[in-house]
Image (cartoon, rainbow, N blue to C red):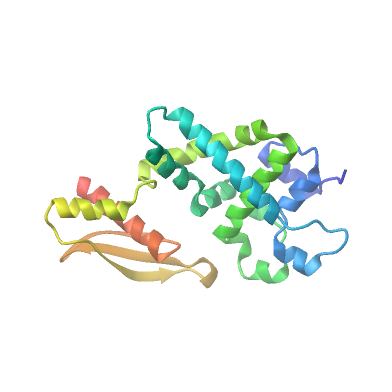
Amino acid sequence: MTAPTAKQSEFENRLGIQFRQPQLLTIALTHSSFVNEYGGADEPSDNERLEFLGDAVVDLVAADLLYNRYPHLAEGGLTQLRAALVKTESLAKLAEQVQVGDYLRFGIGEERSGGRERRSTLCRAFEAVIGAIYLDRGLTVAARFLTPLLLALLDEVLDKRLHLDARSELHERLQARRQPAPQYRVSGTSGPEHDKRFCVEVGSGDEALGSGVGKSKRAAAQAAARDALLRLEN
């Protein structure tokens, strides 16, 4: 059995899980760029296969959590909530909570281009870590680790209505009030190229309704629609 490095042991302590097969965690924390630059006979593979497995485990744990927590919620509602919990932005937040990015191994180019903060990379690494936990300790331990994180995330999803299609809801709300359909425009961007954020404003006719920021124009528009809905309610 390969002994974990001091940094990997530190990450195990952060997770609260001691791996019986430390090599699994090493693989989970290895980006493909590291293997491309430093790969050799003694180096593990990258984390893409573990990401594939972890994605399925996260889906299962989230589905089980929602199924038991909301016994009267129909399939459509459960699907909306699960999608909000397991999307890239949500899992990247969980990765940041356990500081996965601090322990990832990158090639020089990926490191310099901001890979350690890239949300898609953090999401995939988090899924890979979950896959490693599942293989090393089983589904029960993986679910025990994941469930508190998902519950906290669920509170945020419900509070901010992240599971709803805010743009469709806003359109219907304005239509019912016989107001012009919502119009969206990008009002600005910020951040470096690898971590750009878009600011979108939404209005109806000459009336400004809300604004939002997101990692994509679509996400920013959804955030703007949610802001508009909250303003309309208040």
| Residue 81 in which image quadrant | top left
Q: Residue at x 23, y 50 (%)?
A: 231
Where is residue 3? Give x, y as percent: 86, 45
Q: Residue furthest left?
A: 178
Q: Is residue 118 left or right of residue 223?
A: right
Where is residue 96? Give x, y as percent: 57, 50
Q: Is residue 234 visible?
A: no
**Looking at the image, which is closer to me, 32 or 106?**
32
Q: Is residue 176 left or right of residue 148?
A: left
Above or below, 184 relative to 84: below
Q: Residue at x 57, y 61 (%)?
A: 118
Q: Residue furthest front?
A: 75
Q: Residue at x 70, y 40 (%)?
A: 133
Above or below, 203 relative to 166: below
Where is residue 221? Give x, y as percent: 34, 61
Q: Is residue 206 visible?
A: yes
Q: How many marks?
A: 0
**Looking at the image, which is closer to me, 47 or 111?**
47
Where is residue 157? Give x, y as percent: 41, 43
